[in-house]
């Protein structure tokens, strides 16, 4: 499967795993790290269509697409077809491979504007927004990311997907949770399968992918064309190479703590290099990433707490070295006990 290519409106993407759009997480540094380890496709943080139309000062930062990140989509959110169409025209200047529309975000700030997963309640409007974006995008494919529904009583992803396909969408990404679930419980893979069975365009499955086994399971259970990973990549860009190896039938060895800390520092360095802020302020953005790289290790709770106090790269280096020493001392103690 690793050598399989899917086609979204003429854009070729390897059928391994893609990086999901995640606000305040999947910035350029994050996308570049995940691409380095094999992410087949990336999507920008979501950008307000209306904000772009009003010359939002962050437009260039959020919409710029670099060659290293391709194939890449710029994701927009909004609830008004006219603003969406105008925003698409503006975004085209940044030469994205794909335009993606967010109709799945569950946060109150977004749904309060009638955008994100609020559009799961108004399929007609969702279709109009998609149609307006498709018309404005010209030859650039438009995709849409949705949820299984607004609530457990209104699971309508298949119906929504059919309407979006009829409006010209080139692919549908489905997170197998309702808006009411946010990120709790388990993703319902049967919904993703229903969407796949309802449309002829590619379907991207999303939800609860934390390793190669869970990725392969989504492929097998849903028949989806591509799997998208969100939270499973936190502090773990290695997940993409793990999945690629598994799909290619290649043995994979998890990175050592030394490798994890080395990559963590490279990620932090990249955040600092790409940031327009001074080192101390940029480190505020890097703190959560540093903490995520330490998840699951002995004594990590204490170290994660210290990550949120970091104010310089040198401090991050010191912390990483201490963390490595702790893990190695733990291993040596266990060896001594066995001996």
Image (tube, rainbow, N blue to C red):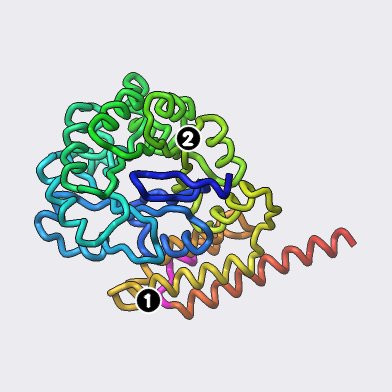
Which residue is labeled 1 in the image? 273
Q: In this view, does 18 lie above or below 208?
A: below
Q: In this view, does 217 lie above or below 306?
A: above
Q: What element carries label 1?
A: helix
Q: Is residue 200 above or below residue 70?
A: above
Q: In this view, does 71 lie to the left or right of 332?
A: left
x 25%, y 29%: residue: 166
Q: In this view, does 14 lie to the left or right of 296?
A: left
Q: Is residue 11 visible?
A: yes
Please tell me whether mark 2 or mark 1 is closer to you in this view. 2
Where does residue 201 sit, x and y in percent of width and height? 37, 34
Q: Which quarter of the rendering shows the N terminus?
A: top right
Where does residue 262 sit, x and y in percent of width and height? 57, 71
Say which of 207 and 225 sits in front. 225
x 35%, y 33%: residue: 147
User: Within the magenta stretch, is there residue 226?
Assistant: no
> Magenta stretch: dominant SS?
loop
**Badge 2 density bin: few <14, some 14–19, many ≥20, Cα 10 Å:** many
Say which of 108 and 167 sits in front. 167
Q: Can residue 84 be seen in this view?
A: no
Q: Is residue 155 above or below residue 206?
A: above
Where does residue 186 sit, x and y in percent of width and height? 49, 32
Q: Is residue 264 left or right of residue 27?
A: right
**Badge 1 density bin: few <14, some 14–19, many ≥20, Cα 10 Å:** some
x 41%, y 44%: residue: 7
Q: What stretch is highlighted in magenta?
A: 305-312
Which residue is labeled 2 in the image? 224
Say which of 115 and 84 sits in front. 84
Real-space Cα separation, disc 2 to disc 1, in angstroms: 37 Å
Where does residue 311 sit, x and y in percent of width and height? 40, 74
Residue farthest toward the right in the current orientation of the protein: 339
């Amino acid at each position: 499967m690793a050598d399989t290519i899917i086609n979204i409106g003429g854009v070729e993407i390897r059928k391994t795993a893609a990086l999901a759009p995640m606000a305040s997480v999947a910035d350029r540094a994050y996308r570049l790290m995940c691409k380095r380890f094999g992410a087949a496709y990336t999507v920008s943080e979501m950008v307000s269509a209306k904000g772009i139309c009003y010359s939002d000062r962050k437009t260039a930062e959020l919409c710029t697409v670099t060659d290293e990140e391709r194939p890449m989509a710029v994701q927009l959110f909004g609830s008004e077809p006219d603003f969406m169409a105008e925003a698409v025209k503006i975004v085209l200047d940044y030469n994205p491979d794909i335009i993606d529309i967010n109709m799945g975000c569950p946060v109150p700030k977004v749904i309060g504007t009638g955008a994100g997963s609020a559009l799961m309640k108004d399929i007609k409007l969702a279709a109009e927004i998609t149609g307006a974006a498709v018309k404005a995008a010209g030859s650039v494919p438009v995709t849409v990311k949705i949820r299984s529904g607004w609530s457990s009583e209104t699971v309508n992803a298949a119906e929504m997907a059919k309407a979006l396909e009829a409006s010209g969408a080139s692919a549908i990404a489905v997170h197998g949770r309702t808006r009411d679930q946010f990120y709790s419980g388990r993703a319902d893979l049967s919904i993703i399968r229903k969407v796949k069975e309802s449309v002829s365009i590619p379907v991207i499955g999303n939800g609860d992918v934390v390793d190669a086994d869970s990725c392969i399971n989504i492929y097998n259970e849903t028949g989806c064309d591509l799997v998208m990973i969100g939270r499973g990549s936190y502090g773990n860009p290695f997940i993409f190479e793990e999945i690629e190896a598994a799909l290619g039938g290649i043995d994979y060895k998890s990175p050592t703590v030394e490798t994890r800390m080395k990559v963590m520092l490279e990620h932090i360095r990249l955040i600092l290099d790409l940031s327009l802020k001074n080192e101390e302020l940029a480190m505020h953005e890097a703190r959560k990433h540093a903490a995520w790289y330490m998840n699951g290790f002995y004594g990590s709770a204490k170290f994660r707490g210290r990550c949120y106090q970091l104010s310089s790269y040198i401090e991050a280096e010191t912390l990483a070295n201490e963390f490595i020493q702790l893990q190695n001392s733990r291993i040596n103690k266990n060896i001594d006990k066995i001996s």
